[in-house]
Image: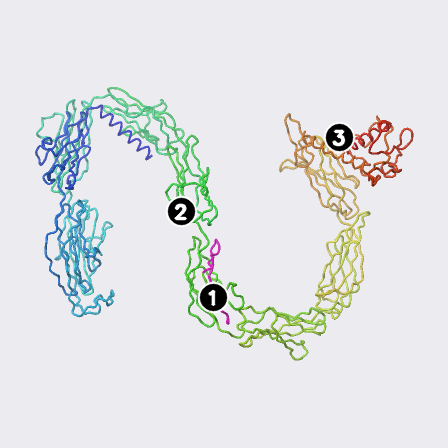
Amino acid sequence: LLCLSLLSLSLSLSLSLSLSLSLSQPPTIMKQSLKDYIVDPRDNIIIECEAKGNPVPTFSWRRNGKFFNVGKDPRVTMRKRSGTLEISFRSGGRPEDYEGEYQCFASNIFGTALTNKILLRVSKSPLWPKEVLEPVVVGEGSPLVLACNPPPGLPPPLTFWMDSAMMPITQDKRVSMGLNGDLYFSNVLAKDSHTDYSCNARFLFTHTIQQKNPFTLKVQTKEPYNDTSSVNSTDPYGGRKVAETTPNFLSPTGTDSSRMVMRGEKLKLECIASGVPTPSIKWFKKGGDLNQKVKLDNFNKTLRIDSVSEEDAGEYMCMANNQIGSIRHSIYVQVKAAPYWLDQPSNLVLAPDENGRLVCRANGNPKPHIQWLVNGGPIDSTLPNPSRTVAGDTIMFRSVQIGSSAVYQCNASNDHGYLLANAFISILDMAPRMLGPKNQLIKVIENNRTFLDCPYFGSPLPELRWFKNGQGSGLDGGHYRVYINGTLEIKRARAEDQGTYTCVANNILGTEENQVRLEVKEPTRIVRAPEHQSAIRGTMARFDCRVKSDLTLPITVTWLKDDKPLSLGSRLKKDEDSLSIHNVHEGDEGTYTCTVKTEIDQDTASARLTVSDRPDSPMDLELSDAKERNIRLTWIHGDDHNSPVTLFVVQFEEDRWESGKWQNLSSYPGDVNTVILELSPFVNYQFRVIAVNSVGQSLPSLPSQRYQTSGAPPDAIPRGLKGWGTKKNNMEISWEPLLDTERNGPNLHYSVWWRRKDTGEEWSNVTTVGAKHIVHDTETYVPYEIKLRAVNDFGLGGESNIIIGYSGEDKPTAPPTDLRVSKIDSTKVNVHWTPVDPSTVLGEFKEYRVYYWREGSMVKGLRVNKEKKTKGFYSTVAQPTGILTDLQPYSHYRIYMVVANNRYEGPPSNHVEFRTKEGVPEAPKFFKIIQRSTDVIHLEWDKPLEPNGILIGYKLNYQTVNGSRVGLMQMQSFLPNVTTYTLHLPERAIRYKFYLAALTQVGAGEVYAEESPHFTNEGNGKCIAPYSKDQVDIATQGWFIGLMCAIALIILILLIVCFIKRSRGGKYPVREKKDLPLDAVDQKGEDGSFDYHSDEDNKPLQGSQNSLDGGVKESDDSLVDYGEGGDGQFNEDGSFIGQYTVKKDKDETEGNESSEATSPVNAIYSLA
């Protein structure tokens, strides 16, 4: 909308300009200098006066109320087609000679326009008067004012105080500069004694600084003053006795004062008080609180209101108080106002006989006086005009006529200033004219407020109406609104608002129209905006920016980083919907903005990228508060790289046991930087710290200084003490050795004690440096009491608790007896036995272990795996029992049992045989669905690998399927020797799901489920069925047939080569006649396909072997001897087939009637 408004404004301005060039118009002032115009004397003086009108205005000037003849002064020139004066001093002259009041007049045949009266003054920056300043001597604690009194400049200078080093004088609650530039001391301290208090005046126009001679201040004290002594805020006098005084105002003086300020100007009220201690200042307003416009400056000494209005008038009170007393001062503020506009007169264009009025309303304090002028002269002194009536601040025009055009001036003035405004009345007679471009195309965004401009002109003022698509009545009201300037507003543009709009303007002199074509577009929106994210340094960051826009508007997607264009490259890549940043680093951090633009709208979205990394190493490790067993470690955090440190790991290294090896000591939360480290005796420590955040761990810090702890007896008791025999007549006592940091001193060794349990014998002991001791010549598996302690040169460590250990185990001597079974099922059986005497176990009882295996299956001809299996039973009852599970049904099993300790098994028990009952069979070995035509499905399967009983048949359930819908279940039963089934399809598109299970007397076994294959529709509508489930039928593809033929030919050739190599010289049967019909095995199947296998294909080939000389060894064996045929096939003469050699005579080949056998052989040999 802003863009459209600016475009409309620029068009209106340009069109208004072109119109004004062709229409008569009185002068209008366009540009003029300020009323109070201060100029720099070093520059030329330029007094501006620009005006427009038709005809082009002429310009004249008055100076100090008199005509100013520009042409007579060689230093003054007037710019062409302008009234601007330029006064040059290149050839001499003084700018001060041209000070005065100037006013410009712009005139043409229709009237005269005036500028404001411009008061021209030359900027002045006078020097400071020469003066000799006597030293200022004052007693400590007394108030003081150092007067500035800057020279009067134009405009007044800015003042400030500095010392001889050009450093500002420090100001505070006690010392500050007043509004008049003076330096105020509420009370003087001895330290204020200086010789260089200098006031400086800065003149803005000339950019110069004038410096006053410096003041010398001497402060007298009742006691000697030492400038090196410390001075604090509670006693600024350094212990010297200074009398306390009540507050007294330095500025303003007295109990009350008054201020007058002009409306819109800045108000500053000041209260500076003396006293010891230094008083504080508070402000109040009578009748109410200080409003939000009030600001307090200069340590509350100055009250400031930047833009005063009438409600700021009233009584303001400042109060100065210290611990001795308080004082008040009232300031009465009056707000006056120079005239300001309420209703400024505007230009008026009328047609003949029309009425109009000019209104000039202004306000001020006091109330302004309104004076009307016409063409620069008092309206009362002009010729009478019957169509004009003056009534105070309004001029009424009735039935105006051609020739009464003029420029009227309204002057509103009071004691504080004046306002001057020009407004012309122009009498024109003109038919409507369209000022905008013809047939303009405007594109807008859907649901946006839309403006269609139709700038026009005419006199009398034309009536304007809008139409859409050239039809219907005028558009106004409801969805539309027509403004007085001709603009049509569509409050919320919709797709149906698209079309051609016509604006028609007419008055009594004619009619004019123009068209605007409106296109409503979808808004451009970022539908997936980038999201704030944190990326680890070295990884990739990706910002999405998916856009939805009108397809007819081209879009441009740009990316900014921190509001600056982003340079794309190998690391930063932009695609259609995103920005990818590869191998991110810290420099990539920032706010990324995606901007999508079309010619009429845009959308933006931003997200921030934070790059995180492993933290920097901790720094400046320091040891303190050292004690015998602990020490304080302090460090400084490194940069966490946008991932807060969650953990600090303290590591140590000692140089006595494992020098150079760093070990973890302890860890601490990430928000600490000082910890107490618990230490071990007799260790020479140094420490380092590692910081950890979510990205990883930092590099270790630099090591700390070393700290060595003193020695002590061992604190730790060795862990993991146990005793266990490795042989039947020993016991090995072992433990975990102490850590190096647990030694606590040199010469660490261990004292081991043991004795038989419950015998009352004395303890035996030994001292060793190792971590085990073996006790020999023990009895088998007897308990011992064992204890241990560590010892070093500083003394004995703590004694361990007594533990019970055992000597070694031996093989159990007795087997379980009376092993028997009961409750035999198809897959489990109960096992019973008589337990052994515990004393025969010769060790810790572990379990009774059953060994069992499958001797065979009761299904004839089924081979089984006789692998032994075991199962343990832990039982100490008098009549133990257990259940042996996971047995194979309908099988012959054998079992026996042993007793076991931790190391050995005892002798076996008696063997027991049993047979499991019949169970349900496993699933069929395979289940195939073969479909070679569109109306028949062939099913094939094989018997289960584990029938688990006597098969009595098969059960086939099937139903139609169509997606999630299924038909009624149908069932077929088969005898055990039937493994095929053919199903005729009522429709070729029907699909079935089949469920096949084998049966025994016990019931149906595991179900094998398959689903009939899909059909594939191709080309001319033929339905080709696949041969395997869910696969495309490739058997009918040309490339597949060719490939299969090639493979078959290669296999045939290889078989013939193998056949000849093995049977060289053998005798082969041939058919009695060449033209015999095919054997039964060569006949076509029922579906028209060939079955290519024969019984002979499965018989082994035998033949003679090659001799050493490479020839063929003769053989008298016939093919019958080799299983190649039992029919005794002979030639017609009854003889066997002749022997074959590598090279055959033509006659021999031709004499053999079995060409089917000889031809391939000759062919292969010729290739060999």
The answer to whether the residues at label 1 and label 3 have Cβ atoms under 8 Å apart is: no
Q: Which residues are magenta?
A: 680-701
Q: CA distance from mark 2 to mark 1?
A: 41 Å
Amino acid at dot 1:
Gln
Assess disc 2: are there few (<14), some (14-19) or many (≥20) residues with their C-alpha within 10 Å of its C-alpha. some
Amino acid at dot 2:
Gly
**Picture layout, residue 272 above or below residue 122:** below
Where does the image place residue 661, in percent across and percent down from the top left? Answer: 52, 63
Tag on residue 1089? 3
Where does the image place residue 234, in percent across and percent down from the top left? Answer: 24, 66
Assess disc 1: are there few (<14), some (14-19) or many (≥20) residues with their C-alpha within 10 Å of its C-alpha. some
Q: Observer-nearest residue: 132 or 450?
A: 132
Which residue lies most toward the front here?
Answer: 1109
Q: Which residue is mark 1?
A: 686
Left or right position of 292 against 97: right
Amino acid at dot 3:
Ser
Please give the count of numbered marks on the rendered protein. 3
Secondary structure state at the residue bearing disc 1:
strand
